[in-house]
Image: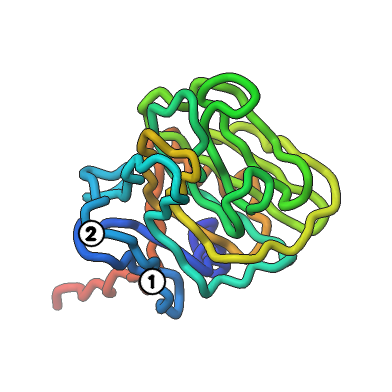
Amino acid sequence: MSIASDLIASLVRGYHFNEGSGINATNFATGGGYPATLTASDIWVAPGKLGAAAIQGDGGAGGGNVVASDSNLPLGTDPSSIAVWFKCTTDNIFWTICGYGTQDLYQYRGFAIGYIYGSPGQVWASNWGTDSIALGSGYNDGNWHLAVGLYTDTYVAISLDNADFVSLVGPTNTPTGELSICKGPFGVEPVTVDEMLVFNRVITQDEVAYLWNGGAGRELTSGKTRFPLPCRLPL
């Protein structure tokens, strides 16, 4: 099997966010169903990283703003991976780019960006326990970045822009709640999200490189592979 087909086979949620209007984002993973429900129809922006549109948090301060959510994704303690493209100019607040669980800094599987205890534009990944990984700074530069997280019952690992995974080893708990996208418990500036993918296994560094595609990104599709029709030679 190819890298693309391996990824598609393990995809349980996939959102292109190409709709550009309305209050639902289609889940294109095999089997479909379970669209992400948007809290409003005016959060669409254009263009996205990989398509015609993306979604953006509205920058509402406090109140736990959630732009999109999916309450039907029981990740539990099973191994899983989340990949998402994001961009923002946040420098002094905390936005959950996407996560499965509560809005607390540690209580989710997913990513947050902002200034918490370190440098502006850090990206955080939680182990749904008592600690998080904080990577680098400057990811609030207004450019698109790819975050990929690996989650198991013993460790969490994060890769940004196709860099090698950095791991946090330790026991993890079972997350509760729903999958939230663009959740801003302390948000005062927007974050934009595109091409969000959730897999039911730990994906590899080679697969991350495939999604990164030299920084250009790569859009997965779940359609059937098309084969060229056989040529008919002239008589």
Comparing labels 2 and 1, the label whose residue is closer to the camera = 2
How packed is label 1: few (under 14 Cα within 10 Å), some, or many (20 or more)? many
Task: Report the colour scheme.
Answer: rainbow
Tell me the element at label 1: loop
Asked if marks 2 and 1 touch (Cβ < 8 Å), the reply is no
Where does residue 184 sit, x and y in percent of width and height? 46, 45
Of the image marks 2 and 1, the number of the one nearer the N terminus:
1
Tell me the element at label 2: loop
Where 92 sits versus 130, above or below?
above
* Count of numbered tags: 2
Where does residue 20 sit, x and y in percent of width and height? 21, 56
In the rendering, which numbered label is found on residue 230? none
Where does residue 109 sit, x and y in percent of width and height? 63, 53
What's the residue at 21%, 53% (across, down)?
42
What's the residue at 52%, 62% (across, down)?
179
Where 42 sits versus 33, above or below?
above
Left/right placement of residue 209 relative to residue 106 reads left
Locate the N terminus and report the quarter of the image it occupies.
bottom right
Question: Which residue is at the front of the view, 235 or 102?
Answer: 102
How packed is label 2: few (under 14 Cα within 10 Å), some, or many (20 or more)? few
Locate the C terminus and report the quarter of the image it occupies.
bottom left
In the rendering, which numbered label is found on residue 35? 1
Query: Residue 6 lies in what quarter of the image?
Result: bottom right
Label 2 is placed on what type of residue? Answer: Ser
View extreme (left): residue: 235
Label 1 is placed on what type of residue? Answer: Pro
What's the residue at 42%, 54% (across, down)?
66
Disc 2: which residue: 41
What's the residue at 29%, 69% (across, down)?
228
Left/right placement of residue 123 relative to residue 175 reads left
Where does residue 205 sit, x and y in percent of width and height? 63, 44
- For the residues labelled 2 and 1, the Cα–Cα distance comes to 14 Å
